Every structure is written in C-alpha cells, then in structure tokens.
C-alpha cells in the first residue's frame, strides 16, 4: 500500500522529528553534533527556512521551523538527513540507512503554542534525565533563544508566525 502524501502549507510552522534507525544513536561525539548543526544551518539558508528551536538528542532530533514555500519542507529534511547520513557513514565506515523511516511533522498553531512547542523541544534533555536544566544542555537552541548566546542558528520567534516585518 503506498504511503499517503503529506499536506504542507505555505507560511506555516511545523515541529519536525527524525529518529535513528531502530532507535540507534546517531550522535556519538561532539564532532557529530557540530556537523549536524552545520548541515542544518546550510539547509536553512538553501531552502529559506526559519528555525525557531532545535534539540539534538543521542538518537533523534527535533526542529521547529517556519517555511515560506511548503514544497521546501521535504527537500529541507531530505537534505539534512542525506547530508548527515553521508557524513556518519563515512566517519564510522558504515553503509545503509541511518534514519528510521520518514521524518515526522506536526503543524503548529500560531501564537503562544509556538513558544510552548519550542520550550517542549528544548526541555527534551531534562525529560530524558541527561540534563537537570535546559541551560546545561549544549545541543539545543535554549542558550541562543533564551540567554542570547551567539550561535546565529535560530531566528527570533514571531508569535503570529507571519512573514511580514511589521
């Protein structure tokens, strides 16, 4: 049975998730996390995506994005997943799939819910018991978004999620 196609909407926000195949770890050291963030940064620019929050965990990652052209979401995630898989397989002399199936996506309602989802994403390490506070976890957007450290990866959240600057 063919899988159903996804419906994405221009100028909408989405919570995207992807997990390692069979829940395997996909980030084994700091270099791996750094490489993934570099790939995300390039993909963000290439596909004109706003990134509002992210969290890289050992076996999966979350992104909170806004797209201006709906057709770019799948291309954006494909570019990240393929790019990181190529890096990982070359780095660890592996072959084959790194990710478990298609990425998951959920549309995010504009307004306060957008901030709530960003907070949920950034608190993932706390819920998993690997950090006691999101400020102590290096591989999420929390420090940049909430403490204003300079990474220049995330975009400021606009509660209405509109594309206008007004």
Image (spheres, rainbow, N blue to C red):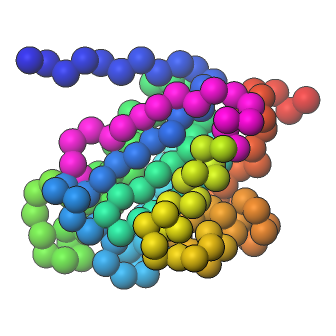
Residue 5 highlighted magenta (yes or no): no
Q: Is residue 2 left or right of residue 127?
A: left
Q: Pinpoint residue 49: horizontal percent, then vertical percent.
A: 58, 40
Q: Nearer the viewer, residue 146 or 130?
A: 130
Q: Is residue 127 left or right of residue 68?
A: left
Q: What segment carries the magenta color?
A: 99-115
Quarter of the figure with the N terminus: top left
Residue 106 highlighted magenta (yes or no): yes
Q: Pinpoint residue 158: horizontal percent, then vertical percent.
A: 78, 38
Q: Is residue 138 visible?
A: no
Q: Is residue 109 left or right of residue 129?
A: right
> What residue occupies the far right of the structure in this picture?
166
Whether 25 is drawn above or below 163: the answer is below
How many numbered dots are placed on residues in this image?
A: 0
Q: Nearer the viewer, residue 60 or 69?
A: 60
Residue in view at x 12 percent, y 70 percent:
94
Residue in view at x 81 percent, y 27 percent:
164
Q: Pinpoint residue 162: horizontal percent, then vertical percent.
A: 75, 27
Residue in view at x 33 percent, y 41 percent:
103
Whether 151 is drawn above or below 8: the answer is below
Q: Nearer the viewer, residue 111 or 39?
A: 111
Q: Pinpoint residue 89: horizontal percent, then vertical percent.
A: 19, 68
- Place residue 48 in its image quadrant: top right
Quarter of the figure with the C terminus: top right
Q: Is residue 6 visible?
A: yes
- Place residue 84 in its image quadrant: bottom left
């Amino acid at each position: 049975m063919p899988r159903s196609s996804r419906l994405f909407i221009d100028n909408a926000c989405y919570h995207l998730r992807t997990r390692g195949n069979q829940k395997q770890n996909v980030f084994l050291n700091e270099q791996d996390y750094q490489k993934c963030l570099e790939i995300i940064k390039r993909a963000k620019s290439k596909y004109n995506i706003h990134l509002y929050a992210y969290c890289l965990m050992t076996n999966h990652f979350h992104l909170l994005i806004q797209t201006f052209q709906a057709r770019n979401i799948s291309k954006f995630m494909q570019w990240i997943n393929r790019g990181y898989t190529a890096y990982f397989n070359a780095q660890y002399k592996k072959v084959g799939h790194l990710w478990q199936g298609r990425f998951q996506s959920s549309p995010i309602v504009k307004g306060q819910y957008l901030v709530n989802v960003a907070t949920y994403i950034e608190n993932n390490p706390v819920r998993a018991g690997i950090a006691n506070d999101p400020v102590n976890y290096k591989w999420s957007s929390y420090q940049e978004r909430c403490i204003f450290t300079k990474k220049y990866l995330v975009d400021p959240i606009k509660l209405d999620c509109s594309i206008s600057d007004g």
